[in-house]
Image (cartoon, rainbow, N blue to C red):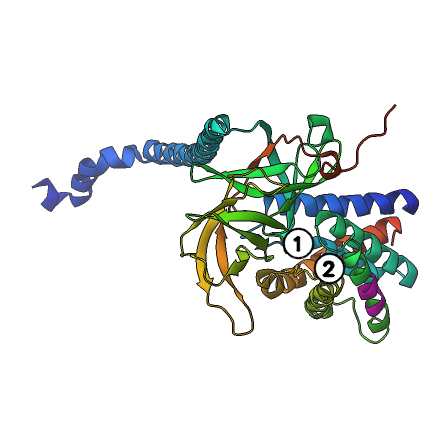
């Protein structure tokens, strides 16, 4: 069953992010729901599935942008691995720890992607506006997305 | 007299009308309250409709203005609606709702209409059957050969990944004033000549180790307010028109 439900959840996450960025951006800003979904999946799922989810959501983010293709996939995969390591030491189930992790990992991901883009394509993809505001929006979005994913996991056994 | 002898009768007679009508008044009050609530609801719905119609009117006016402008353009093309802008790549790219099924090809020029004028927004970057991705001129990887008014001197305008563009490699003795208009140059292959690109915003003095000057350019098209774009049909050389379908 999860073979059908997980691709559906993946498509729904991507589709919802598409809809949000098309209709609800304010001054070009919106919470990065792909990041929130990747972090929530990494917290809830085991190491292999968590990193696979992060990779696939990263590919979706790459498809939406025009930067180094595969850059976000790599960044999110590494994030999945980092979450796998830190969740053995910290309680990642509480909203506060998710909020702190989202804040730190958002900045980490943006900086890493910026570095990748500068090294491989000599382009500067992330704007200052995104760098300063998006991590806070992500920090608010992650606990909500986590609850939705957790509810789906308990109900249907996915992730 | 009645007041001194029978005050209760006096007051009873005086206010009996009000006392008798208390139930009726109370019912009227309730009805008024209900009516008031209904009217408030109606006002709210009408205000919503008013806002909706104001938005539609302004969209209608914008589209009419854009259509009028596009008819005056010397190039043929088609209109497309922007269907997605990603915050992480806000000044880099966006998707439009027209693809190869509508005749869009790679490297087609994309114009935006602003302040009653057509300006260069970017070029088509990836084409799918029903939608395409547009690479904006503000993307760090985008550039265009342009000429600067009034001398017509050619220079390279590059995106910076922010809302501003940069004009580069201008000889230090060139005349480039703030406010000068920049249009695409006849020598460029990707864009048709004469398309408005933007205005020089700030000229930077020459650095001691360089022999050219640079300037910031305010783009002709503001990506934040752009909703529709005009994609020019260009008969580009085969090598610039992207991958072709194999001959059957």
Q: Quadrant of residue A138?
A: bottom right
Q: Chain of mark 1?
A: B
Residue B22 is situated, as x and y percent measured from the top left of the image, at 32, 36
Q: Quadrant of the N terminus of chain B?
A: top left
Q: Chain of mark 2?
A: A
Instruction: Write the start and end of the magenta stretch as one range.
Output: A77-82
Is residue B88 shown in magenta?
Answer: no
Q: Is residue B220 visible?
A: no
Q: Quadrant of residue B43?
A: top left
Residue B20 is situated, as x and y percent measured from the top left of the image, at 29, 33
Residue furthest to the top: B248
Q: How many marks?
A: 2
Q: Residues within 10 Å of mark 2 (few under 14, many from 20)?
A: some
Dot 1 lies on which element?
A: loop
**Observer-nearest of B163 and A90:** B163
Q: Is residue B118 above or below residue A88?
A: above
Locate residue A109 relative to residue B213 in the image: left or right: right
Locate residue B227 relative to residue A85 in the image: left or right: left
Residue furthest to the front: B173
Q: Main SS type for the magenta part?
A: helix
Q: Image point 35% across, 36% down: which residue? A: B29
**Observer-nearest of B143 and B228:** B143
Q: Which residue is mark 2?
A: A121
Q: Which residue is mark 1?
A: B141
């Amino acid at each position: 069953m999860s073979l059908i439900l997980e691709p559906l959840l993946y498509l729904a996450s991507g589709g919802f992010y598409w809809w949000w960025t098309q209709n609800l951006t304010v001054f070009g800003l919106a919470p990065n729901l792909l990041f929130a979904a990747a972090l929530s999946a990494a917290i809830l799922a085991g190491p292999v599935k968590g990193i696979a989810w992060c990779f696939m959501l990263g590919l979706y983010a790459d498809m939406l942008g025009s930067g180094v293709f595969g850059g976000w996939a790599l960044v999110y995969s590494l994030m999945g691995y980092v979450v796998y390591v830190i969740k053995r030491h910290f309680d990642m189930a509480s909203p506060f720890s998710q909020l702190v992790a989202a804040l730190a990992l958002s900045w980490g991901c943006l900086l890493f992607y910026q570095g990748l883009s500068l090294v491989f394509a000599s382009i500067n993809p992330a704007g200052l506006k995104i760098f300063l505001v998006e991590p806070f929006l992500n920090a608010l979005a992650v606990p909500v997305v986590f609850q939705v994913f957790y509810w789906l996991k308990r109900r249907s056994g996915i992730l | 007299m009645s007041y001194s002898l029978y005050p209760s009768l006096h007051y009873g007679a005086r206010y009996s009308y009000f006392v008798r009508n208390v139930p009726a008044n109370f019912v009227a009050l309730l009805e008024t309250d209900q009516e008031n609530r209904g009217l408030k609801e109606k006002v709210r719905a009408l205000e919503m409709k008013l806002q909706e119609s104001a938005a539609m009117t302004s969209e209608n006016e914008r589209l009419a203005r854009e259509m009028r402008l596009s008819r005056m353009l010397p190039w043929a093309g088609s209109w497309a609606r922007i269907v997605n802008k990603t915050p992480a790549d806000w000044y880099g790219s966006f998707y439009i709702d027209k693809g190869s099924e509508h005749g869009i090809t790679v490297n087609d020029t994309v114009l935006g209409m602003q302040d009653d004028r057509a300006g260069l927004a970017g070029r088509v970057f990836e084409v799918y059957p029903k939608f395409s991705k547009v690479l904006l001129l503000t993307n760090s990887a985008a550039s265009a050969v342009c000429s600067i008014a009034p001398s017509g001197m050619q220079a390279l305008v590059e995106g910076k990944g922010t809302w501003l563009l940069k004009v580069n490699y201008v000889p230090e003795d060139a005349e480039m004033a703030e406010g000068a208009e920049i249009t695409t140059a006849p020598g460029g292959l990707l864009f048709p000549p004469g398309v408005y690109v933007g205005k020089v915003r700030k000229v930077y003095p020459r650095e001691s180790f360089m022999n050219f000057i640079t300037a910031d350019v305010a783009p002709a098209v503001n990506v934040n307010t752009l909703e529709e774009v005009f994609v020019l049909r260009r008969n580009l050389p085969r090598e610039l028109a992207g991958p072709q379908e194999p001959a059957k």
